[in-house]
Image (tube, rainbow, N blue to C red):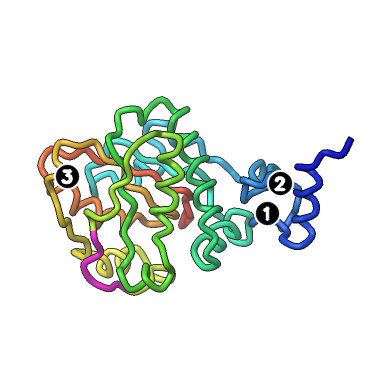
């Protein structure tokens, strides 16, 4: 007996191939953007479950942070770099949502982030977000929210002025570049809240530090940090 649903799936696949954003493999489910092989090759850090992990230490003496961590190690020419490129430059929001869901699973299973009230995606400068069509940190946050069942606060923290790309800057240059570049439009929505600031990749932490400092000026806020990946300078 013919399985109609499978036949329709196979037929549509000939004309509208559904391939993995990491490796191009077509052996994946319709509702997935990344195949199981690529998922298995993503190098998890285990930081979310570890007190005093390298991301938390990164902010010692710089920013008052309750908890912090990154889900994966970032290396050049890796599957993860390809996936992040797909998210940021190829308009592939499905990749970001799926990565965000996996990040949410890591946070939930760590047992340390259970008291968070809301997620805050690190904002882009408005012109950059308009050009891209979305904020990749917001896409990750939406995926995390699918798992954590928390609100995503998108329009409260803003990038107040344009900053140059951080990619080729050293730590001190990065800090000068972003210092004072974040603004809060409605502080009342953040007061007395335990907040999780979300971004895609952390290197020196300068951008997150600048944004975190703006948030910590609000009364009785508790700040934690979660990023998809850590690109170590070592």
Asked if the residues shown at circle 1 and circle 2 are in contact, with their CB atoms under 8 angstroms apart, the answer is yes
Front one among 73 and 115: 115
Of mark 3 and mark 1, the one earlier in the sequence is: 1
What is the x, y in percent for residue 152? Answer: 32, 45
In the figure, 109 relative to 161: above or below?
above
Local crowd size for mark 2, using a 10 Å CA cut-off: few (<14), some (14–19), many (≥20) = some
Image quadrant assignment for residue 54: top left
Q: Residue at label 1? A: 20
Front one among 108 and 153: 153
Local crowd size for mark 3, using a 10 Å CA cut-off: few (<14), some (14–19), many (≥20) = few
In the visual, does 98 lie left or right of 203?
Answer: right
Image quadrant assignment for residue 6: top right
Q: What residue is drawn where x is 35% and y is 27%? A: 114
Asked if the residues shown at circle 2 and circle 3 are in contact, with their CB atoms under 8 angstroms apart, the answer is no
Q: Which mark is residue 28?
A: 2
Name the image quarter holding the N terminus. Answer: top right
Q: What residue is drawn where x is 29% and y is 53%? A: 154
On whether residue 161 falls in the magenta region, the answer is yes
In the figure, 13 relative to 174: above or below?
above
Q: Which mark is residue 189?
A: 3
What is the x, y in percent for residue 129? Answer: 37, 67
* Residue range of the region highlighted in magenta in the rendering: 158-163
What is the x, y in percent for residue 220? Answer: 13, 38
Front one among 195 and 74: 195
Local crowd size for mark 1, using a 10 Å CA cut-off: few (<14), some (14–19), many (≥20) = many
Q: What residue is drawn where x is 48% and y is 55%? A: 231
Q: What residue is drawn where x is 21% and y is 67%? A: 160
Q: How many marks?
A: 3
Image quadrant assignment for residue 13: bottom right
């Amino acid at each position: 007996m013919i399985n109609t649903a499978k036949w329709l799936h196979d037929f549509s696949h000939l004309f509208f191939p559904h391939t993995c954003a990491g490796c191009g493999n077509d052996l994946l489910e319709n509702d997935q953007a990344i195949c199981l092989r690529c998922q298995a090759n993503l190098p998890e850090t285990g930081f979310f479950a570890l007190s005093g992990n390298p991301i938390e230490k990164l902010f010692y003496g710089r920013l008052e942070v309750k908890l912090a961590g990154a889900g994966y190690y970032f290396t050049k020419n890796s599957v993860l770099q390809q996936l992040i490129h797909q998210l940021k430059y190829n308009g592939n929001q499905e990749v970001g949502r799926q990565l965000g869901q996996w990040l949410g699973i890591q946070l939930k299973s760590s047992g340390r982030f259970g008291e968070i009230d809301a997620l805050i995606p690190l904002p882009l400068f408005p012109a950059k977000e308009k050009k891209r069509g979305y904020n990749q940190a917001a896409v990750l946050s939406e995926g995390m929210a699918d798992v954590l069942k928390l609100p995503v606060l998108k329009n409260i923290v803003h990038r107040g002025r344009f900053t140059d790309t951080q990619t080729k800057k050293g730590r001190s240059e990065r800090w000068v570049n972003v210092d004072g570049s974040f603004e809060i439009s409605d502080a009342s929505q953040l007061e007395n809240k335990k907040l999780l600031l979300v971004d895609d990749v952390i290197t020196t932490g300068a951008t997150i530090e600048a944004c975190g400092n703006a948030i910590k000026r609000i009364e009785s806020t508790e700040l934690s940090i979660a990023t998809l990946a850590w690109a170590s300078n070592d």
